[in-house]
Amino acid sequence: MKASIIIPNFNGEAILAKNLPYVIRAMGNKENNIIEIIVVDDGSRDGSIKLIKENFPQVKIIKHKINRGFSAAVNTGVRGSSGDLIVLLNSDVVPNEDFLINVLSDFKNPKVFAVSLHEKGYGWARGGFKDGYIQILPGGEETSFHESFYVSGGSGVFRRSIWMELGGMDEELLSPFYWEDIDLCFRAAKRNYIVGWEPESNVVHNHESTISKLPKKYVSRIKERNQLLCLWKNITSPILVRKNLIGIFARIAKHPGYIRVVLMALGRLGIVLKKKKKEIKESKVSDEAIFGRFS
């Protein structure tokens, strides 16, 4: 299977200069089956485009005129790609020279939708439902392929055909960032596709992304809002829906400021309800069954 690497970028000139050479080196290893590297520039105002054109001519550039957010940048890259597999790498992720070899074997199973790459210190993701909310907990660093609750949108590999079937990341609901990869993988799991983690596909994540430079309070509110939106859209179990309502009131009682997050989410309720109908219609696996895999 052929792989397309997609790197979303926003004002990341310095990071690209440092890390793109490693990505190009990995492309030079024919065993990785990489056919293209695509940088989707999401309205940068720095010298990112000039840097790539002058120093990395083998990299394909797709440019947004304005900043549209992470999901939109990734979706644009996927539409412009030609590989069977989509490799999503944040600009601050450095791959090993042979990082895709073992992942390619994982995709021999046609039911596998996505596989997380191995960032040292992090294993597969455990998903749970507690106090009315979806919980993401760390799994272990195993020695073989392991099922995962979700695959990171910053260092993961996705089967393009299923990505297109699912409609990609939900940029309409979850922009500008956070929970889009969890949402995508949960939708895949509910359609009975496999999401996993590969210990032998190693990358280094240097955590120099744009989000880390934004105001922490703003980022926190968007993250909490999208947690609610992802849950409202995807959780169809009446029991879990009731638990979420109870959980919301409990959080507000304990932290009155949380009402602002709820109001932010309610502002997109119309979009949520439209998308929820599709999830109810197309889901094959129950919410409880998915969470039960990780209990």
Image: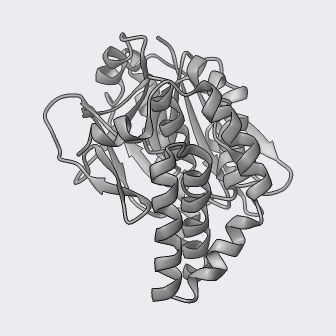
On the question of residue 54 being in view, the answer is no
Front one among 7 and 274 = 274
Q: Residue 177: give x, y in percent of width and height.
A: 62, 58
Q: Residue at x 24, y 46 (%)?
A: 123
Asked whether, in this view, residue 94 is left or right of residue 234, the answer is left
Asked whether, in this view, residue 23 is left or right of residue 118, the answer is right
Q: Residue at x 49, y 62 (%)?
A: 244
Q: What sort of colour scheme is used for the picture?
A: one colour
Q: Residue at x 45, y 16 (%)?
A: 33
How many numbered badges does the structure rendering display?
Answer: 0
Q: Residue 265: give x, y in percent of width and height.
A: 68, 66
Q: Residue at x 61, y 33 (%)?
A: 280
Q: In the figure, 266 relative to 251: above or below?
A: above
Asked whether, in this view, residue 123 is left or right of residue 240, the answer is left
Front one among 248 and 72 = 248
Q: In the figure, 287 relative to 128: above or below?
A: above
Q: Residue 54: give x, y in percent of width and height.
A: 69, 43
> Residue furthest toward the right?
65
On the question of residue 205 being in view, the answer is yes
Front one among 50 and 36 = 36
Q: Quadrant of residue 274?
A: top right
Q: Residue 64: give x, y in percent of width and height.
A: 81, 47
> Residue furthest toward the left?
143
